[in-house]
Amino acid sequence: MKQHYYNYWSKIFDLELNTLLDANPMLNKSGRYITKHGDKYIYFYQDLTNSKKILTASLKNQIMYNLNVNDLSYLNSANINNFKNLHLAFHDIDYGFSRPTDFIKHQTISTNLLIKKINAEDTSTLDDFLKLCSEDDIDTLDLDLTNDYALGAYINNQLIGVSRYVKIRETQVADITVLIAPMFRNQKSSIPLVSEIVENILSNDLCPKYRVKEDNLASMKIAEKLGFQQLFHISALDTEQSN
């Protein structure tokens, strides 16, 4: 299953898969790093699953940085002079499975909780749900009912949570997002909701990817209770803002 994640990253970083997997013993003591310059961000990737050593850049940006784990987590002018006018936009963790059997299925325990597929005819119900959420939460969910597979969690016929996945183009990776309305986040609906969407992903021979922010302990707990493992770190520097 890890091969699917590597295929995903080779697409993201516009690198041949062999280049992504090759080791370079002259660089870091541990970990594997890729940097890529985008339109707004400079992205850094760290592979947590392999002790081989590599640090490289995307094909059009052959810039190499010798970073250690702490540098990657806290990029700033103190440890990388090249980025003295930039700041860390985000540092996220990608969770995944080494094999499908790592998945720990969780059943819905509450008799009040119903999980079912969201379709185009559920638009008005979805609109009512989104009114309960912040703009940042809505942007993070980034739901498109035309292209995404989505499940809703309902309590007493009210939609209180949504999880969706989208298949990343030209790969077998399915990117998962989950959003629970703020006033319902103590209802323990997240784990069974994500569990059902992971089950659907695996039944379609896809590879689940669950990304969380490094300080989102609640999302980390959801991932780990379902058997996910930390596989990759992804960081980004914002090129449009200064410290």
Image: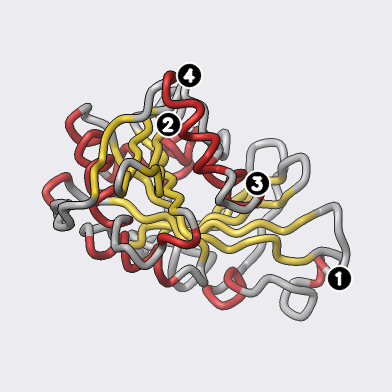
The amino acid type found where label 4 is placed reads: Thr
Upstream in the sequence, badge 1 or badge 4?
4
Q: Which residue is mark 1?
A: 243
Circle 2 sits in a helix, a strand or a loop, which is it? strand
Query: In screen coordinates, is 147 left or right of 238?
Result: left
Residue at position x 86%, y 70% in the image:
243
Q: Are marks 2 and 1 in contact (CB under 8 Å)?
A: no
* Distance from the alpha carbon under mark 4 to that under mark 3: 30 Å
CA gap, disc 3 and disc 1: 21 Å
Q: Is residue 111 left or right of residue 47?
A: left
Q: Where does the N terminus fall, quadrant-wise? A: top left
Question: Sequence order check: which comes first, mark 2 or mark 1?
Answer: 2
Packing grade of label 2 (10 A; few <14, some 14-19, many >=20) is some
Q: Which residue is label 3 attached to? A: 36
The crowd level at tag 3 (other Cα within 10 Å; few <14, some 14-19, many 20+) is: many
The numbered mark, 2 or 4, whose residue comes first in the sequence reads: 4
